[in-house]
Amino acid sequence: MMIDSPAFRFSSSAFQESNAMRLIQYCNVGNIVGGTAACAWSVTRALPDFEHVVLFRSPPTVETRRAFEDCQIAFVPHLSQKILASWSADVLMMHNISPANVFWGLDEKKLTVRGLQYIHSAGGSRAGAARVVCCSESLREQLRQPSIDVLVQGVPIAVSGWGCERDQNRFVVGRICTPVDRKWPRELLGFYKQLAKAHPRIEWEFVGCPQSLELPLREACCGRAVFHRAEFHARRLMRSWHGLVYHHPSLSETFGRIVAEAMRCGCVPVVDDRGGFREQIIPGAGYLCGEMEAFADALEELQIPGRWVSQSRNCQSHAEEHFSIRAFRERLLDQLIRC
């Protein structure tokens, strides 16, 4: 694939000679499960005509190394001009990187490559760059920086076609989340107990649930619960799920990458009416829920014959337009051009 012609506006001499722009990404964590590395992975897929180097502030896990096997990767606790020069960087893209983790010299303006800081969450300062973007309107409001642009992520599709692998004799609803305690609060036990009681037909699957919560969560779901390890490829499970439920009593997500991935394969999201989810869900393609009853009602509606089929198709159509790797490429090139 040839690079889109507007990209030549920021071509360096190295690009003109080798016909391949070298993009360096710097991630704040080396774990592709639940980290900014998943977004960095999407960047490499959106720009296959670039040369990719992905650097991590913490040692990359085995799974992360496997995901980036077609890229050059390295563990770099602190980034400097010298390191960038050693990788012959043309463009630098930082993911949630603080000023303490980079050293450009006494004058930040001495950064010799075009740079973009991609902010994924609020809290703490971020290293300076020629251009700063964030992942959602919700996050931009939290940052109180109306001048920065929103760059919505693109995500892979877990399976082609819509709903072709669902067992119509079962109705499966899942939750997939980072395997840390703060993402799996104890309040979920009461939440799922009510849903399981209201919907005895639903079978529940959980990805990333801490082991300490598995037994009580299985009991809350009346025994109808299956647990899976948190892995990068666990998103493939969503091709057999009819719905994705995400609720957290206190934590709002700035952008639901899993929600976008679910929609791409026709898995209907039923999620909190908060944060970045509000920008992802539209009428007829998923449900935004405030109270407990709203979650129960949404799941009830999805089990009406024909209703899930309509919602699933709408989700996939909406996600293809807004969250596909193809759409991400266009948005990403536009930002890099403006660095």
Image (tube, rainbow, N blue to C red):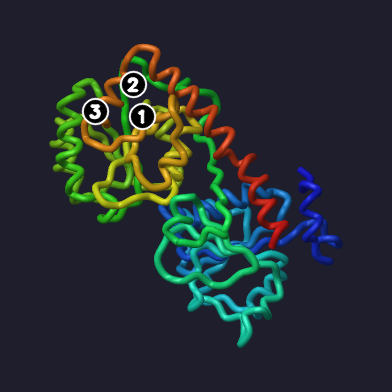
Residue 213 horizontal/vertical position (percent): 19, 47
Mark 2 residue element: helix
The residue at the point 56 percent across, 65 percent down is: 26
Q: Amino acid at mark 2?
A: Leu
Q: Is residue 244 visible?
A: no
The C terminus, quarter of image = bottom right
Mark 3 residue element: helix
Q: Which residue is mark 2?
A: 302
Query: How far apart are the alpha carbons under marks 2 and 1?
Result: 8 Å
Asked if residue 200 lies left or right of residue 70, the reply is left
Circle on res. 296: 3
N-terminal of the two: label 2 or label 1?
1
Q: Amino acid at mark 3?
A: Ala
Q: Closer to the camera, 205 or 39?
A: 39
Tell me whether circle 2 and circle 1 mark residues in contact (CB < 8 Å). Answer: yes
Residue 183 horizontal/vertical position (percent): 29, 52
Asked if residue 306 lies left or right of residue 24, the reply is left
Circle on res. 243: 1
Mark 1 residue element: strand
N-terminal of the two: label 3 or label 1?
1
